[in-house]
Amino acid sequence: MIHYSVIPMDVIFEGMDTYEPKFIEIDQGGVKMQIEPISGFQARIVRLFSCNPQDYLNNQYAPGTIISYSPVAEATLTF
């Protein structure tokens, strides 16, 4: 890939090697999706894991859309 720009490459790719996204898989409205938390109760949709083509046509589930969600802590049972 060739990238032509007047901006130095150091500025364009700054922080690229240290970026570690925190993705979570949730089920919202019957649609399984992968999200990236932004703040306590907001997240950005990264992608859908749905088999229903209608879910991909729904603007509510478009990648990049900001949604509200409630994080749930998972309990680990040990005996």
Image: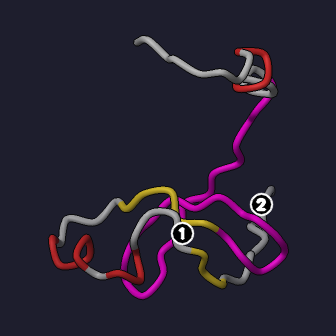
9 lies left or right of 60: right
Element type where label 2 sits in the image:
loop
Q: Residue at x 44, y 63 (%)?
A: 63
Q: Residue at x 66, y 21 (%)?
A: 6
Number of numbered markers: 2
In the rendering, at what x and y percent does residue 75 appear?
78, 67
Label whose residue precedes the other's in the sequence (2 or 1): 1
Position above or below: 19 against 24: above
Circle number at residue 26: 1
Q: Write down the quadrant of residue 20 in the picture.
A: top right
Range covered by the magenta-colored residues: 18-43
Q: Residues within 10 Å of mark 2 (few under 14, many from 20)?
A: few
**Which residue reaches farthest left?**
53
Distance from disc 2 to disc 1, alpha carbons, whole Å, reads 18 Å
- Tell which tag, 2 or 1, sits nearer the viewer: 1
User: Mark 2 sits on what residue?
Assistant: 76
Q: Write down the quadrant of residue 51 in the picture.
A: bottom left
Amino acid type of the residue tagged 1 in the rendering: Ile
